[in-house]
Amino acid sequence: MRFFLLSDGFSFAALFVSYVALRAGSSSLKPAEAPELSAGIAGGLTLLLVGASAAMVGARRAAGSGKSRTTLALLGGTAALGGLFCAGQVLEYRSLAAAGLAIGDSLYAGTFYALTGFHGLHVFAGAVAATAVAATVARRGAATFDSDRTSRTVAALGLYWHFVDAVWIVLFTSLYLW
């Protein structure tokens, strides 16, 4: 997982460097007619991801303690909050597109959608992975719950989830606040 996250970090870094280079090369990367991004909406999305991370931390602790039902519930919470983040991002995209920010309109639009879409894909993948691990825990049940194996699996998933969270914090700061 660490190797994967390192390589994935390079992908995000390349997108961020592109954004910064485009922004530095233009006095105004954002076209005048482009709608303003809502820091409020993005702040709400941030709270969803932070909540999902908190649930992931709890899932890891529960798995290590042999608490299969708690692990299952917290993994489900992580997946649900990740799903809500993705739904919120789709709603934001629809709102921005209706306000005139389409993908092919400008470098700004293309960069915005590339960065946030790539991140959203990662959140979706994390939610699917959390659902898959939760399904495995549910299928095995409390009687055959292997806390060591499950704890290692949830720990790896947690590394991924926290990485995605950290990327969002940089994205949120760069795109919505900068």
Image (spheres, grey):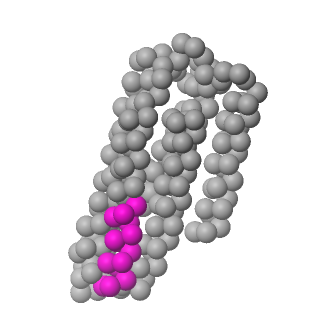
Q: Position of residue 29 (x, y in %)?
A: 65, 23
Q: Residue at x 49, y 61 (%)?
A: 162
Residue 45 visible from this viewpoint: yes
Q: Nearer the viewer, residue 166 or 14?
A: 166
User: Where does residue 126 sit, x and y in percent of width and height?
Assistant: 44, 57
Identify the residue at the far right of this view. 25
Q: Is residue 104 toward the left or the right of residue 13 in the image?
A: left
User: Which residue ends up furthest to the front in the rendered image?
Assistant: 178
| Residue 61 lies within the magenta run | yes
- Report the side of 5 relative to 59 (left or right): right
Q: How many numbered markers are drawn?
A: 0
Q: Locate the N terminus and report the quarter of the image it occupies.
A: bottom right
Q: Quadrant of residue 33?
A: top right
* Residue bounds of the magenta highlight: 53-66
Q: Does the magenta segment cover residue 155?
A: no
Please tell me whether residue 35 is drawn above or below residue 53 in the rendered image. Answer: above
| Res. 25 image quadrant | top right
The residue lying at 63 percent from left, 48 percent from top is 12
From this view, report whether residue 115 is shown above or below residue 146: above
Q: Main secondary structure of the magenta part?
A: helix
Instruction: State whether residue 7 is above or below residue 83.
Output: below
Task: Quarter of the image for the C terminus: give it.
Answer: top right
Q: Is residue 123 left or right of residue 167?
A: left
